[in-house]
Amino acid sequence: MRIGELSRRTGVSPRSLRYYEEQGLLRSSRSGAGQRHYSDAAVQRVSLIRQLFDAGLSSRVIATVLPCVDFPGDLGVAEETFTAMMRERDRIDADIAHLVETRDALDVLLRANSRHRAELSAAPEPVARSA
């Protein structure tokens, strides 16, 4: 199938499909005129790539994970994939820790702002001076 049909069948833009190919995530053959042609299996492949992107993985990490799908019986590939996924999990854990710290700092500011607003609402209104 050509890129337009793959795009229609997967809901992924042709531009994204070309990007997947540039990143080594998707393969096509070329016609004599240079048009991309994809196998029927490309539909499943694109679906998996979208799931991995939706899970927050980068194209670099996805490129490391996909060989495990392509060569499921290769222990070396499985080990490399495991290592890449653990690195990605560690990165996500670090991001979460940073977000928790940021949220805690914001909570301190919110409490200070709440106290300040309470003080302002309890204070008497300033008297307006006439000109």
Image: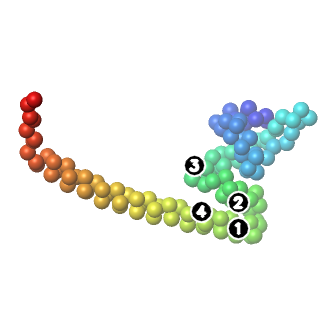
Q: Is residue 76 above or below residue 131?
A: below
The secondary element bearing badge 3 is classed as: helix
User: Which element carries disc 4, helix, strand or loop?
Assistant: helix
Q: Measure the alpha-carbon separation of dots 1 and 3.
A: 22 Å
- At label 2, the amino acid type is Thr
Q: Which residue is mark 2?
A: 64
- Image quadrant holding the N terminus, namely top right
Q: Earlier in the sequence, mark 4 or mark 2?
A: 2
Name the residue tied to disc 3. 54
Local SS, label 2? helix
Residue drawn at 66 percent across, 58 percent down: 61
Disc 4 to disc 2, C-alpha distance: 11 Å
The residue that mark 4 highlights is 88
Q: Nearer the viewer, residue 119 or 6?
A: 119
Q: Which residue does the numbered mark 1 point to in the structure image?
A: 80
Relative to 129, residue 79 above or below: below
Say what secondary structure mark 1 lies in: helix
Disc 4 to disc 3, C-alpha distance: 14 Å
